[in-house]
Image (cartoon, grey):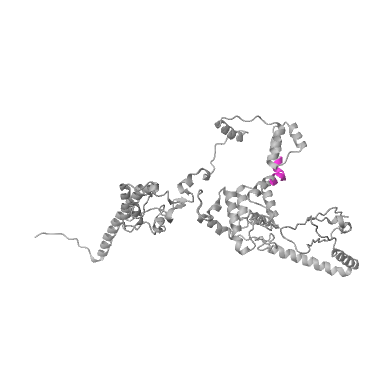
């Protein structure tokens, strides 16, 4: 009789022993599956992906998806194209990809694109599908018109690199000299002092130097003479006006709304002045950018002026071109104008191309575009649309509501005190009545001739002056008569010879 031994496990420990054995089995199974998955991933990366890239990506990747089929992601071949999913994992008979590479009905690659795959290449794809079509590509490797790898290494997307500092007074010349030497070029002769101050003044202010400024520089032989010229120009208001104008051109600034009526934007000048002042104050470009995009949300300080400046800075958004007469239907065109200009002005990219499709060249997808749209669609325009009669809305007050109430209460108090004192001054009452009668008379009137211009003073010399005293409030109103068109009527008013007694 054969003998055998058996280990006795107390009842209390049997569950633990069974659990332990099950855990070991699960671990072993998991290891086997993980190993199998790693092998499948490796097979795909070494065999399948290179084959797809070489033979299929030309027509079925990025923005080129013939028949609507993309083979550059797992989601792409699972969704398939016009004929349905390209691959059914584990099912060779129903996978269109297998039919196509075997030239059964479909013929891929086409004969004019290299012709049928080699037998060993067909075997690679068939093995891949039969083993479950394991594809580790979760997300697309394409960003618009570039691969993710290319986008990471493309020269214009690289951060600015620090360079070794040259300890000399001519640090800029060092970099210029390097480029000249690489191109076998020699520097131009030194400029005369007259040429130097003219170049600097034109460059920094857009204006010529005065005769006295040229003479002063020519006669100043101190070591810091040119530095004094540069500092004077940088401190001038004209510096901000000149370079601010460049920026205003880039961001398509105008005092009017564009479109057919081209009517004025009443508060655009505030943004224009903010740009000029920011440049004159040497605001860092990071802050300059943030304030224009979100100054109302992230002002540079907590004072009332800083908060107001942040609101004014967002005039960059408010000066977007106006479209159409139906504000509700056409507001999206203003948002699109903002996004298009944002890409060109701040990024140097044509982001607007991604409005209808992934960008053909740059790494910008339609998802990126509409993510931006979702942000800027919250923008409210004070004077939307281009209708002849403006309808201001969503005006943002620069003075806090509490300050407005306080000022209004002060006004009411002073007004009540003034009115209470009027009955005690008969002469004041008579003068106010006289002024009221005078101010409600028409100074001059005329019909516009065929030339489109009419100088009132030529025909009504006695109606062009009106005496007032210092401290009096004068409201001068110009009324158009009959019908007028928003596109054609303009009035210029010149007030001259003001004499204050």
Does residue 148 appear anywhere in the picture? yes
Based on the picture, tell me whether residue 465 belongs to the magenta stretch. no
66 or 1, nearer to the observer: 66
Residue at x 84% of width, y 57% of height: 456
Does residue 139 appear anywhere in the picture? no
Q: Position of residue 225 (x, y in %)?
A: 71, 34
Q: Position of residue 418 (x, y in %)?
A: 83, 66
Instruction: Assign the N terminus to one quadrant of the image.
Output: bottom left
Based on the picture, tell me whether residue 236 belongs to the magenta stretch. yes
Q: How many marks?
A: 0
Q: Position of residue 420 (x, y in %)?
A: 84, 69
65 or 102, nearer to the observer: 102
308 or 339, nearer to the observer: 339
Main secondary-structure element of the magenta-colored stretch? helix
* Relative side of 415 to 290, left or right: right
Residue at x 57% of width, y 51% of height: 343
Residue at x 35% of width, y 47% of height: 46
Query: Residue 31 sits in which quadrant?
Result: bottom left
Segment tinted magenta in the rendering:
232-241
Instruction: Assign the C terminus to one quadrant of the image.
Output: bottom right
* Relative side of 45 to 456, left or right: left
């Amino acid at each position: 009789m054969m003998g055998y031994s058996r280990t006795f496990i107390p009842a209390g420990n049997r569950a633990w022993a069974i659990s332990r054995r099950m855990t070991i089995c699960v671990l072993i199974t998991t290891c086997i599956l993980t190993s199998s998955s790693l092998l499948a991933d490796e097979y795909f990366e070494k065999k399948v992906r290179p084959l797809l890239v070489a033979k299929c990506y030309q027509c079925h990747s990025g923005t080129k998806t013939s028949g609507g089929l993309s083979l550059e992601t797992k989601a792409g071949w699972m969704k398939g194209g016009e004929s349905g999913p390209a691959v059914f994992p584990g099912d060779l008979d129903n996978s269109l990809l297998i039919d196509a590479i075997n030239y059964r009905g479909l013929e891929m690659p086409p004969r004019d694109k290299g012709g049928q795959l080699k037998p060993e290449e067909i075997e690679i794809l068939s093995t891949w599908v039969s083993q479950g079509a394991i594809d580790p590509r979760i997300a697309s490797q394409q960003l618009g018109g570039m691969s993710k790898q290319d986008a990471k290494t493309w020269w214009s997307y690289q951060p600015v690199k620090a360079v070794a500092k040259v300890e000399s007074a001519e640090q800029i010349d060092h970099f210029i000299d390097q480029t000249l030497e690489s191109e076998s070029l020699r520097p131009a002769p030194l400029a005369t002092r007259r040429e130097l101050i003219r170049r600097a003044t034109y460059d920094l202010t857009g204006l010529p130097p005065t005769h006295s400024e040229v003479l002063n520089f020519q006669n100043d032989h101190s070591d810091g003479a040119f530095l004094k010229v540069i500092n004077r120009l940088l401190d001038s208001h004209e510096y901000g006006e000149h370079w601010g104008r460049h920026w205003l051109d880039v961001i398509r600034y105008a005092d009017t709304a564009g479109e057919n009526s081209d009517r004025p934007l009443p508060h655009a000048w505030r943004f224009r002045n903010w740009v000029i002042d920011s440049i004159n104050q040497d605001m860092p470009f990071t802050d300059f950018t943030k304030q224009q995009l979100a100054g109302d949300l992230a002002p540079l300080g907590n004072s009332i002026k800083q908060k107001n400046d942040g609101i004014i800075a967002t005039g960059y958004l408010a000066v977007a071109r106006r479209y159409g007469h139906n504000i509700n239907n056409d507001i999206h065109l203003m948002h699109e104008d903002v996004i298009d200009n944002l890409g060109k002005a701040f990024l140097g990219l044509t982001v607007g191309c991604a409005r209808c499709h992934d960008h053909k060249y740059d790494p910008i997808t339609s998802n990126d575009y509409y993510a931006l749209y979702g942000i800027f669609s919250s923008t409210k325009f004070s004077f939307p649309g281009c209708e002849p009669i403006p309808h201001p809305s969503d005006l943002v007050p620069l003075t806090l509501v509490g300050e407005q109430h306080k000022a209004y209460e002060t006004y009411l108090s002073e007004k009540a005190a003034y009115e209470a004192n009027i009955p005690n001054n008969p002469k004041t009452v008579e003068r106010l009545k006289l002024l009221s009668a005078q101010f409600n008379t028409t100074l001059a009137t005329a019909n516009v001739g065929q030339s489109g211009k009419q100088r009132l003073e030529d025909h009504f010399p006695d109606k062009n002056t009106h005496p007032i005293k210092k401290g009096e409030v004068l409201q001068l109103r110009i009324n158009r008569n009959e019908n007028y068109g928003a596109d054609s009527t303009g009035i210029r008013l010149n007030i001259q010879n003001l004499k204050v007694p």
